[in-house]
Image: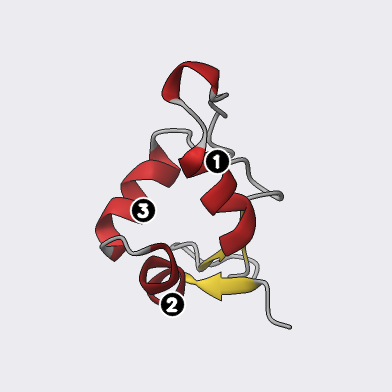
Amino acid sequence: MKTWFFTGEAAIALDLPAEKLRDLYRSGMFKMGFHVRDVSPNGSRRPTLQFHVNRCQEQLCMPPEKRKTYPLNK
Protein backbone atom coordinates (compact mmCIF):
# COMPACT_ATOMS: atom_id res chain seq x y z
CA MET A 1 0.00 0.00 0.00
CA LYS A 2 1.30 3.44 -0.93
CA THR A 3 2.14 5.68 2.04
CA TRP A 4 4.13 8.56 0.51
CA PHE A 5 2.31 10.97 -1.80
CA PHE A 6 3.39 13.98 -3.84
CA THR A 7 2.01 17.31 -2.65
CA GLY A 8 -1.07 17.36 -4.89
CA GLU A 9 -2.08 13.80 -4.03
CA ALA A 10 -1.43 14.33 -0.32
CA ALA A 11 -3.47 17.53 -0.31
CA ILE A 12 -6.44 15.65 -1.78
CA ALA A 13 -6.07 12.81 0.73
CA LEU A 14 -5.84 15.30 3.62
CA ASP A 15 -8.66 17.46 2.23
CA LEU A 16 -6.48 20.58 2.09
CA PRO A 17 -5.45 22.91 -0.72
CA ALA A 18 -1.93 22.06 -1.91
CA GLU A 19 -0.68 25.56 -1.02
CA LYS A 20 -1.99 25.15 2.56
CA LEU A 21 -0.08 21.87 2.84
CA ARG A 22 3.10 23.62 1.65
CA ASP A 23 2.49 26.46 4.12
CA LEU A 24 2.13 23.96 6.97
CA TYR A 25 5.40 22.34 5.93
CA ARG A 26 7.18 25.71 5.80
CA SER A 27 5.76 26.66 9.21
CA GLY A 28 7.43 23.63 10.85
CA MET A 29 4.31 21.50 11.27
CA PHE A 30 5.95 18.43 9.72
CA LYS A 31 9.26 16.74 10.49
CA MET A 32 11.57 16.13 7.53
CA GLY A 33 12.15 12.42 7.04
CA PHE A 34 9.11 11.45 9.12
CA HIS A 35 6.13 13.45 7.85
CA VAL A 36 7.68 14.78 4.65
CA ARG A 37 10.66 13.94 2.45
CA ASP A 38 12.43 15.61 -0.44
CA VAL A 39 12.81 13.31 -3.43
CA SER A 40 14.30 15.87 -5.82
CA PRO A 41 17.53 15.00 -7.64
CA ASN A 42 20.80 16.16 -6.05
CA GLY A 43 21.59 19.72 -7.01
CA SER A 44 17.97 20.60 -7.72
CA ARG A 45 17.04 24.20 -6.92
CA ARG A 46 13.49 23.31 -5.93
CA PRO A 47 12.39 20.53 -3.59
CA THR A 48 10.07 17.78 -4.76
CA LEU A 49 8.16 16.89 -1.64
CA GLN A 50 6.33 13.73 -0.68
CA PHE A 51 4.13 13.54 2.40
CA HIS A 52 3.37 10.51 4.57
CA VAL A 53 -0.38 11.01 4.65
CA ASN A 54 -1.14 8.90 7.75
CA ARG A 55 1.55 10.61 9.84
CA CYS A 56 0.52 14.05 8.60
CA GLN A 57 -3.11 13.28 9.45
CA GLU A 58 -2.11 12.29 12.99
CA GLN A 59 -0.17 15.54 13.37
CA LEU A 60 -3.07 17.61 12.05
CA CYS A 61 -5.54 15.90 14.42
CA MET A 62 -3.39 16.63 17.46
CA PRO A 63 -4.52 19.65 19.51
CA PRO A 64 -2.35 22.69 18.63
CA GLU A 65 -1.04 23.05 22.18
CA LYS A 66 0.36 19.49 22.06
CA ARG A 67 1.97 19.70 18.61
CA LYS A 68 5.71 19.91 18.23
CA THR A 69 7.17 22.17 15.60
CA TYR A 70 10.21 21.28 13.54
CA PRO A 71 12.85 23.48 11.94
CA LEU A 72 13.15 23.38 8.17
CA ASN A 73 16.26 21.63 6.89
CA LYS A 74 17.49 23.84 4.09
First-in-chain label (3 vs 1)? 3
Position of residue 48 measured from the top left corner of the image (x, y, whole percent): 50, 68
Q: Quadrant of residue 17?
A: bottom left
Total marks placed: 3
In the figure, is residue 5 to the left or right of 33? left
Residue at far bottom of view: 1
> How far across and how far down the image is residue 27, in percent?
39, 34
Q: Residue at 58% across / 46% down in the picture?
A: 58
Distance from disc 3 to disc 1, alpha carbons, whole Å, reads: 15 Å
Residue drawn at 65 percent across, 67 percent down: 42
Q: Which residue is mark 3?
A: 22
- Crowding near pointer 1: few (<14 within 10 Å), some, many (20+)? some
Amino acid type for the residue under numbered disc 3: Arg
Contact check, label 2 and label 1, Cβ < 8 Å: no
Q: Judge depth for marks 2 and 1 and give the one in front.
A: 1
Q: Is residue 60 above or below residue 4?
A: above
Residue type marked 1: Gln
Which of the pair 45/27 is nearer the observer? 27
Note whether residue 52 is visible: no
The amino acid type found where label 2 is placed reads Glu
User: Residue sitting at 48 percent across and 41 percent down?
Assistant: 61
Label 3 SS: helix
| Mark 1 element type | helix
Classify residue 12 by image quadrant.
Answer: bottom left
> Where does label 2 land, which residue?
9
- Comparing 38 with 53, the one in front is 53
- Between the C-alphas of marks 2 and 1, the distance is 18 Å
Identify the residue under disc 1.
59
Q: Nearer the viewer, mark 3 or mark 1?
A: 1
The mark nearer the N terminus, 2 or 1, is 2
